[in-house]
Image (cartoon, rainbow, N blue to C red):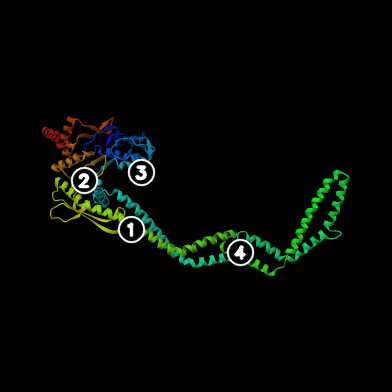
Amino acid sequence: MLSSLTIKNYALIDHLQVDFNNGFTTITGETGAGKSILLGGLSLILGKRADLSSLRDTAKKCIIEAQFNIQNYNLESLFSANDLDFEPLTIIRREILPSGKSRAFINDSPVNLGVLQVLGSHLIDIHSQNETLQLVDDAFQFQVIDALAENSKELKTYREKLSDYKKLKKELVKLKEFQSEAIKEHEYNSFLLKELVDAKLKEGEFEALEEEFESLSNVEQIQEKLTLAHALFSEENAGVLTRITELKNTLVKLSGLAAKYKPVAERVTSSLIDLDDIFGEVEAFQEQLDADPNRLEEVQGKLTLLNNLFQKHFVNEVSELITIREALALKVADTENVEANIDKKEQEISKVQASLDQVAEKVHKKRLAVVPKLKKELETILASLGMPNAQFNITLNYSDTYFNNGREELSFLFSANKGGQFNLLKKAASGGELSRIMLAIKSVLTQYENLPTIMFDEIDTGVSGEISNKMADIMAQMSVTMQVFSITHLPQIAAKGHTHFKVYKADVNEVTTTNLVKLNDEDRVFEIAQMLGGTEVSESALAHAKQLLNHVNS
């Protein structure tokens, strides 16, 4: 329940602090006194967006703070899901800064408006005249039926499965679109892939082939140079190896005469070993060198093929061609497998659809089961509200379409008069009748929804006399299990409240300010007398007001 409300620097309110009780609270005041301002401030607590026009003094920040007693409403999981500390007495605060920036806090933890709206929907239902128009919406009508059917768990499961179903359907559409486009490109991609596969690509082969091509192309010149090198090494008298061998022998003998020559002899010996090794490699090169025109032609052909592939695919490396080949292989495979993938996706869809249908059928049966009960309860309540011939014709027809809340099309028809035609609510009911229907629905809903507080903003519009008494009785009955507020212009309803507040304007220092005050017994008599007879309060109006209040208290 809403236990207190503090408003500072909001619209015509300078500073307002008020405590509320449980039960049935009525709020009255002249038109334009500021009841809508009070509701506007409370709406900010529930997550409504704000702007600078809300500030009374644009140089100061606006603060709206409300305390709710929520210990009996099982909201711990909601707090936990939003990483908030749960407090039985929870404080929600909104601040609007002069800069226009808005901040929100729950138990001093900063939150965004989305979190505020989610929590607010579990704390208080502000019912304005605009919300009476919800009566004509299928979504609201389904909400009423589902509340009685206790379908929340099934609908949660249904929406999860519907999300999966829609996701799979989108994937199927993409697969079919891919198939349509891929078929056109498949032949060309297959040709490109075959060309790259036949090329037997290997990383680094282009460079190796270029080197081999250079060798095969210049075999005669290479043979000539290798022969010369061989001769320079091995010539009998003047060859490098012969002369170096003589030098080594001389230095070895010299090192035997004096130790200081030994390092030089060792270095020459090492050089001779290296030269001898080099000579061996030259001989090996000569043996390996072979003029092979066929191999030259083969290498030249492979290089030409690779260069052509480089140009065709706009790359410079064999590794890039390999990457393209792998991508093409996937495309071709996907195209060749797309029919199987489509079949597999359709089987997945069929399985999820069967599960979805099962949940939808359960929702449908539970709705059908409560429709007669809802119809009877609404008609009974409306009969007490001066609509004895009110009848509802509520039908649920199974559809091939998967809606967000099931597979049904709802027909919620109404007739206010005996023998009258059933028609849509917006066509069959007047404004006053819609208000009474909404009150009847809210009265039924309170038996199934555990909402701490409900606030009716002039739900009595279009009614008077005995009907207003009956409406007040219904709201008073609702207040046995929840906190009920009614902003009203009718004295019959105002008198039924357990607590009575008045909204009024006052000029302070030539500035108009809106205030809210709790009325004592004497002030309450005077307020109701004014509501009965106008500003000039007569003795009969006072007597009538006392009669109304005594009747309530008796």
Query: Circle 4 — which element?
Result: helix
- What label does residue 306 carry, if any? 4
Q: Please say if the residues under marks 4 and 3 sit with CB atoms less than 8 Å apart.
A: no
Q: Earlier in the sequence, mark 2 or mark 1?
A: 1
Amino acid beneath label 4: Leu
For disc 2, the marked residue is: 444
Task: Give 74 or 28, whichever is nearer the viewer.
Answer: 74
Q: Position of residue 342 (x, y in %)?
A: 41, 62
Q: Residue at x 36, y 58 (%)?
A: 351
Task: Give 250 or 442, whichever is nearer the viewer.
Answer: 250
Amino acid beneath label 2: Val
Q: Earlier in the sequence, mark 2 or mark 3?
A: 3
Q: Please say if the residues under marks 2 and 1 sit with CB atoms less than 8 Å apart.
A: no
Q: Residue at x 13, y 42 (%)?
A: 466
Q: Earlier in the sequence, mark 4 or mark 1?
A: 4
* Left or right of 206 on screen, residue 252: right
- What label does residue 241 carry, if any? none
Q: Earlier in the sequence, mark 1 or mark 3?
A: 3
